[in-house]
Image: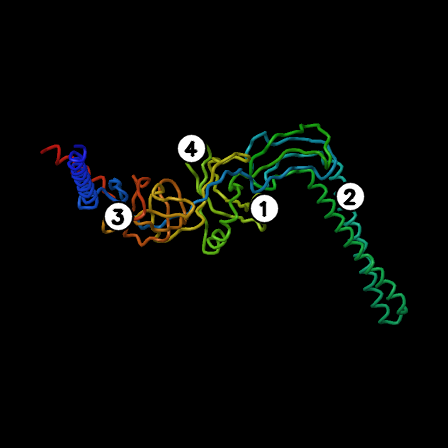
Amino acid sequence: MKKNHLGPIVAAVLIIAGATGCSQDKEAAGAGGPGAKGKGGQPPAVVNVVAPQRRDVPVVQQANGTVTPIRTVDLHPQTTATIRQVHIKEGQFVKAGELLFSLDDRADRANLDKAQAQVERDRAQLADLERQYKRSQDLFAQKFIAQSAVDTLKAQVDQARATLQSDIAAVRAAGVTTSYTSIRAPMSGRVGGIAVYPGSLVQPSTSLTTITQLDPITIAFTLPESSLPALLAAQRSGKIAVEATPGAGMKPVTGTLSFIDNTVDPAAGTIRVKAEFDNRDTTLWPGQYVGTKVTVQTIKDAVVVPQNAIITNAQGTFVYVLDKDHSAKQVPVQRLYGAGLDAAVSGLSGDEQIITEGKQNVRPGGKVRLASEVDKGGKKGGSA
């Protein structure tokens, strides 16, 4: 009885197993057919693409700098004397040659007058000896005196002439000493604090005031040593423009690079440079802290892509490019210069479609869909 029931049960089990196998084969066939979702069973990633731009890209270096005057003079007297008069005020703008201080010059003028009187006495003595020498020549021609007498007078004339030249030099020296009592501006600029007053006793170690040249003026700052070759090349080809921002809310001013140091700081890896600016409106002030921008070079006809399209990982730097079959192609690039939202790169021809948004879901060779096509499909489905 049991054997008769065992046959139908085994047959039923075989029929169920066969049906299950057929169902699994159909599902596998469906997964590999035209309705497949994509590589690895994942749906295509939705992305946005942009076209690269071609344009000249200026390579700009930004640095903080300090305004430094081209010249600053600390005025000291060259003689010991008393201040007779101060002709300027603190903070005043002066021109080159303008009288600033007058010292007591009575003793110096007396010495100058004495030296001039000595010159006049020497001239009179020389004139008398020259007359005697001329008479001696006439007497010698008439054989009234000997040749030795003529030679003696000739020596006296030469000695008197040398004495006169020496005293004339002494007059010039006295004149120079007298000129020290009138202190004039060596250059145009702004006067600093004045530390002396009429009646003050001054000597060569005494600081009277300072004069600082404000127009033109320079800004000193440092740049990375990597920019040195481009700086030198640009300097050889012409002037290098430098833009400085004096402060918040103030308009930038433009100058030119005037100095590149002859050594690189090995500790910091920087090169010290200066830029010169016209400063007629005194926008820049010595010691002021300002921001600078200098264009070290210009990359001609560069391929420019958005910065957020560039991916950097252990394999290198690359972008995803939309291929003809709507797959993502990985293209290696090199960032030449990046500033703001864009970057100039090499490795692209410029006619590609660069994937920007959605690239985190993209795999090399994987299928992608454009966000614009998805939006269109959604609108059509909604209207139906």
| Mark in the foreground, 3 or 2 | 3
Estimate the spatial distance between the alpha carbons at disc 4 and disc 2, rounded to whole Å.
61 Å
- Name the mark on residue 327: 3
**Kind of element beneath mark 3:** loop
- Name the mark on residue 35: none
Q: Earlier in the sequence, mark 2 or mark 1?
A: 2
Estimate the spatial distance between the alpha carbons at disc 1 and disc 4, rounded to whole Å.
32 Å
Who's the residue at 69% across and 40% down the image?
180
Estimate the spatial distance between the alpha carbons at disc 3 and disc 2, rounded to whole Å.
104 Å
The residue lying furthest to the front in this view is 1
Estimate the spatial distance between the alpha carbons at disc 3 and disc 4, rounded to whole Å.
51 Å
| Mark in the foreground, 2 or 1 | 1
Who's the residue at 48% across and 51% down the image?
231
Q: Amino acid at mark 2?
A: Lys
**Kind of element beneath mark 1:** strand
Q: Amino acid at mark 1?
A: Asp
| Mark in the foreground, 3 or 4 | 3
Tag 3–tag 1 contact (CB < 8 Å) = no
Q: Earlier in the sequence, mark 1 or mark 4?
A: 4
| Mark in the foreground, 3 or 1 | 3
Q: Nearer the viewer, residue 296 or 225?
A: 225
Label 1 crowd (10 A; few <14 / some 14-19 / many >=20): some
Q: Earlier in the sequence, mark 3 or mark 4?
A: 4
**Kind of element beneath mark 2:** helix
Q: Nearer the viewer, residue 190 or 31?
A: 31
Label 4 crowd (10 A; few <14 / some 14-19 / many >=20): few
In this figure, which residue is indicated by the disc labeled 4? Answer: 250
In this figure, which residue is indicated by the disc labeled 1? Answer: 265
Q: Earlier in the sequence, mark 3 or mark 1?
A: 1
In this figure, which residue is indicated by the disc labeled 2? Answer: 114
Tag 1–tag 4 contact (CB < 8 Å) = no
- Quarter of the picture holding the N terminus: top left
